[in-house]
Image (tube, rainbow, N blue to C red):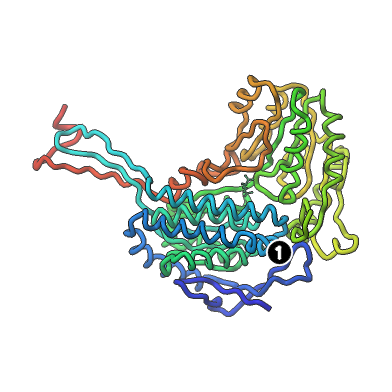
Amino acid sequence: MEQFKNYINGEWVPAISGKTFLNYNPANLEDVIGEFALSDKEDVEKAVEVAKAAFEKWRLVPAPRRGEIMRKVGDIFTRRKKELARIMTREMGKPTFETEGDVQEAIDTAYYAASETRRLFGATVPSEMENKVNLAFRVPVGVVGVITAWNFPIAVPSWKILPAVAAGNTVIFKPSKDAPHSGVIFAEIMEEAGIPKGVFNVLLGKGSMGDHIVSHPDVRVIGFTGSTEVGRHIAEVCGKNNKKVSLEMGGKNGQIVMDDANLDLAVDGALWGAFGTTGQRCTATSRIIAHKDIYDKFIEMLKVRTEKLKIGSGLEAGIDMGPVIHRASQENCERIVKIALEEGGRLITGGHKMTQGDYAKGCFFEPTIIADVKVNDTLFNEEVFGPVLSITKAESFEHALELLNHSEYGLSGAIYTKDVNRAWTAAREIQTGLCYINAPTIGAEANMPFGGVKGTGNGQREGGWTAFDIFTEWKTVYFDYSDKLQRAQIDNH
Ligand code: UN1
């Protein structure tokens, strides 16, 4: 069986304890991907020590030169895109056209980070005194801990790792235990691009190891994508230790379909938003809020299209939707469907685990639609992270907005309408970090701020120029060339 190691200080090393764990293909649990280093506290200590030492040199490398490495990272991802997509699909399930998109997002992020190293603008500001100039510029923070989920195993890590490294920080990356091979790939690519020893390190392992990264006093920033429960815990630990932290957590994203919408387009959007990535995106569409005048028609149109989706291993050609990530997730989909029906939901299609023939070997769940879901029902409120979509009837535009905003989360929201006034009103009123007009709730681009309000995040934004706010601090410099003592707030008043 293939063995996969940690990447620390430019070396491939087993966990200090020698322990390992296995990872499986969710489309076929008989397919074992490999044996991975199971890191623990000692491995974290070693990685932080080297990352801390490497920071002292890396922070002094001119940013545009750091950017040259980012550009090479983009070139290597481009060269390996198709090959990597198959590796990623094997370990996390989504079809290869999607994993290719995942790699493309990292390519876009790499080139963006490279170009940003020639900007990283600061400010010069007039001083209130003579012969004095005030400046503010960005400086790297130190060692950054990156902890991510498995659903975007290359793209989401790239959103954090590449701006962090480009800005002059050093990184310890803990990929998800369900996508460790992608973490290994990230290290291979950084190594080939010429990243200096210790600047980028990968520790494979489980959640308890992530805890040691979060609580280590020399890790100064945490970038996290994952569950709300874990994110809240991380925020507490970081709060106690005065660490910067960026959290990207749950979502319960809604798509409004108004009576004047282009219904074919709205169906396309719902289908892709709800069942793309098997509903396992933090941005996935999990609630449709449809105006009463098109409610029945929309449900019928969506049902017909949903039943045509081809389900199977994402490694096969022509597959629209792969498995969910593991058995527990399959059970969870089954549980939530049962509750939704008990609470009065109407099953339109799907609703079951797929257990016939080859499906039995994997973790497949039918694309599921449940209509007549009410505002206080469990399915309307609980994040599923699977292919289970609810549909709720809205009496009016105002009611649709009210329903959409009825959520503890606030990541993404969408509206389909041809009415420009309603579209702009919705863009203002929808309480989410991402808002789409006539487009699905998924599909963020690498050069724009990404993140959510309410229970989804903690006010930070990854993506685009805003990612650099997470991974830098402002340094204010007062440069006095008057050759005399000038007292602020006193001498000029
Ligand atoms: C995620 O699900 O964690 O906007 C990220 C999108 C993708 C990123 C999703 N570009 O759906």
In the image, residue 255 above or below residue 318:
above
Query: Which residue corresponds to the image point at 80% horizontal and 56% vertical from the top-left?
Result: 331
Q: Is residue 171 left or right of residue 186?
A: left
Q: Which of 478 and 105 is in front in this view?
A: 105
Figure check: 470 above or below 43: above
Relative placement, left or right, of 112 versus 387 is: left
Residue bearing the label numbered 1: 90
Residue 80 visible in the snapshot: yes
129 or 230: nearer the viewer:
129
Observer-nearest of 189 and 80: 80
The extreme left residue here reads: 484
- Image quarter hosting the C terminus: top left
When asked about the image quadrant of residue 265, the answer is: top right
Residue 221 spot, x, y in % from top left:
45, 55
Asked which secondary structure carries label 1, the reply is: helix
Q: How crowded is mark 1: few (under 14 residues within 10 Å), some or many (20 or more)?
A: many
Location of residue 283 by image quarter: top right
- Direction right: furthest residue: 356
- Toward the front, the furthest residue is 79
